[in-house]
Each structure stands twice: as C-alpha cells, then as structure tokens.
Amino acid sequence: MIRVAVTGAKGRMGSTVVQAVTDAPDMEVVALLDAGDAITAQSVNGAQVAVDFSVPTVTESNVHALIDAGVDVVVGTTGWTEESYARVSEHACRAGQAVLIAPNFAMGAVLAMKFAAMAAPYFESAEVIEMHHPGKVDAPSGTAVATARGMAQARRAAGWGDMPDATQTDELGARGGRVDGIPVHAVRLRGLTASEEILLGNEGEQLVIRTDSFDRASFMPGVLLGVRRVIGRTGLTIGLDEVMDL
Ligand SMILES: NC(=O)C1=CN([C@@H]2O[C@H](COP(=O)(O)OP(=O)(O)OC[C@H]3O[C@@H](n4cnc5c(N)ncnc54)[C@H](OP(=O)(O)O)[C@@H]3O)[C@@H](O)[C@H]2O)C=CC1
Ligand SMILES: O=C(O)C1=N[C@H](C(=O)O)C[C@H](O)C1
C-alpha cells in the first residue's frame, strides 16, 4: 500500500483526493493537513507521497517542508514560476526526493495542451480562453499559462513572429493578458468547474480545441497515476504527460 498525505485536505480538490485515495486499492491516507497545520516528519505520519492542493501563495513552502520531511510530492496547486520551479528542483535533487507538478491532471486537458503545441506551428493566430468557477483565486489558470507557453515555444521553433493584430486602443484590457505573446482570456462563471478553449486561425480556417471538466472526479485518475509514478523518480518533473506513456 502506498501511504499518502494530503495537504489542503479540506479544500474542494483536497477533499476529493482524500476520497479517491481512500477508494484506491493500492493506497491509504495516513495524514490530512490543512491551513494552520505544521508540515513535519511527525505530522506526515510515515507518508511516502504527499499530494498538495493548497493555495498558490503557500504551495512552494509546503513542497520544501514535505521534501525536508522525506516525502515525494505530487502538486496540483497553481501559481508556479520559473524561479519557484528552479528552487524546488535544486532542493529535490539535493535531498534525493521526487516532485511532480502538473497544472492539470484531467486527461482531456493534458491532451489538449499536447494537441495545441502540435498545432501551433501550422497556424498564424492563437488565443486561449479559460473558463472557471467563481471560487478560483488565481487568473489566468495554470493550465492556460502552460498551454500558451507550449504554443509559444512551438511557434518560435517554427520561426513565427508576432501574430496579426491591428488593435491600437484597448483601455479596458479587452484583448486579454499576454503569456509569451499569446492572448489569454479568463471567464469566471457560476456553474462551471474548469474549461479551456484554444483557438487557432489561418486565412479561411479555424481549429478549436476544447476541454471541459464538469466534475472534480475528472482530475482523480491523473492524480492517482501521479502518486504511483512519482515513486522511484528524483528531482522535479513538470506535467503529467511526462509520466504518461504518450
Ligand atoms: N492540477 C489540477 O488538475 C488542478 C489544480 N487545481 C488547483 O488546486 C488548487 C486548490 O484548488 P481548490 O481545491 O479549488 O481550492 P480550495 O480553496 O477549495 O482549497 C485549498 C485548501 O488549502 C487550504 N490551505 C490554505 N493554506 C494552506 C497551507 N498552508 N497548507 C495546507 N493547506 C492550506 C485552504 O484552507 P483555507 O480555505 O482555510 O485557506 C483550503 O482548504 C488551486 O491552485 C487550483 O488552481 C484545481 C483543480 C485541478
Ligand atoms: O482552480 C481550479 O479549479 C483549477 N485550476 C487549475 C488551473 O488553474 O489550471 C486546473 C483546472 O483548470 C481547475
């Protein structure tokens, strides 16, 4: 049995993870930690892997504390930067522990990000619209940032320059935020869980890639896969696709 600790255990995702781990035949929950609980070798209670779905402002410090407690970590919390990745990578390598950080564990979203990067070199224009429940504290979503970065990298490798856009005035920011030059738009709407639409355009044609998570159950197979696959690795892995046989 894989012994699992959950940090952010009382949250929307954390509580869903607790149920999924409890239901998994090869795992057991050994520690439930949330805001105000110290993360120490004692409080993780013999966990081999911790799953962190906390909040963007604390996730990095949780991961450092979990590494110090001798636990491998699977992280779904958003808010990561290149600098925070680098700090965690260095710490995990030095400690001989493994950390897997994925902006999205839903199979549809993981594949949508892959498909978007595959398609990007063949289209002149690309934009991302992410749509979430109004309880989400960060914008744009971690998935939208990762999607845009993947497309921007593929466009650069293919030699594309700036996208066509004649906009001269945008006092309201209606053209969205830019991630590596790709416009990203965020919608917050009661009733939604998590959706993303990736628009790619050429003269006379459009490709739309859309992924919808209607329920947090959609993230659970990916989270459980991450728990199983993080064991035996060392250092930082970014993205569930890196541990899938894609
Ligand atoms: N990778 C993926 O597939 C997915 C990622 N996410 C991401 O997961 C994160 C959590 O989302 P969600 O569950 O909706 O958020 P919630 O706000 O519902 O849950 C966060 C939980 O973390 C708790 N918390 C706050 N501080 C700490 C701390 N220092 N240590 C441990 N727990 C703490 C919060 O407590 P309190 O409320 O008291 O502050 C709360 O219980 C977000 O970043 C979201 O974007 C979400 C869905 C899928
Ligand atoms: O906060 C959420 O709900 C989600 N957050 C992640 C993100 O920011 O990409 C993943 C998913 O979109 C749900």
Image (cartoon, rainbow, N blue to C red):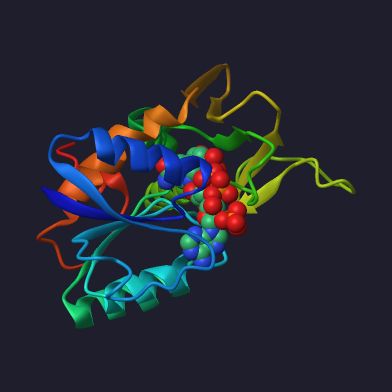
Give the tally of numbered discs. Answer: 0
Q: Residue furthest top?
A: 204
Q: Nearer the viewer, residue 61 or 89?
A: 61
Residue located farthest toward the bottom when viewing the structure as drawn: 94
Q: Is residue 233 left or right of residue 151?
A: left
Q: Is residue 42 left or right of residue 157?
A: left
Residue 130: percent from left, percent from top: 59, 35
| Residue at 21%, 77% in the rendered image | 93
Q: Quadrant of residue 18?
A: top left
The quadrant holding residue 104 is: top left
Q: Position of residue 16 (x, y in %)?
A: 41, 37
Q: Is residue 80 visible?
A: no
Residue 205 is situated, as x and y percent measured from the top left of the image, at 54, 17
- Kindly identify the residue that appears in the image at 70 percent across and 27 percent down: 190
Place of residue 182 in the rendered image (x, y in percent of width and height, measured from the top left): 58, 46
Query: For this view, does 159 lie left or right of residue 74?
Result: right
Of the pair 6 and 229, the residue shown nearer to us: 6
Identify the residue at image location x=58%, y=37%.
128
Residue 87 visible, this orientation: yes
Residue 243 drawn above or below residue 111: below
Q: Quadrant of the C terminus?
A: top left
Instruction: Indicate whether 130 appears above or below 156.
Output: above
Query: Viewer-proximal residue, 35 or 58?
Result: 35
Position of 246 relative to 69 (above/below): above
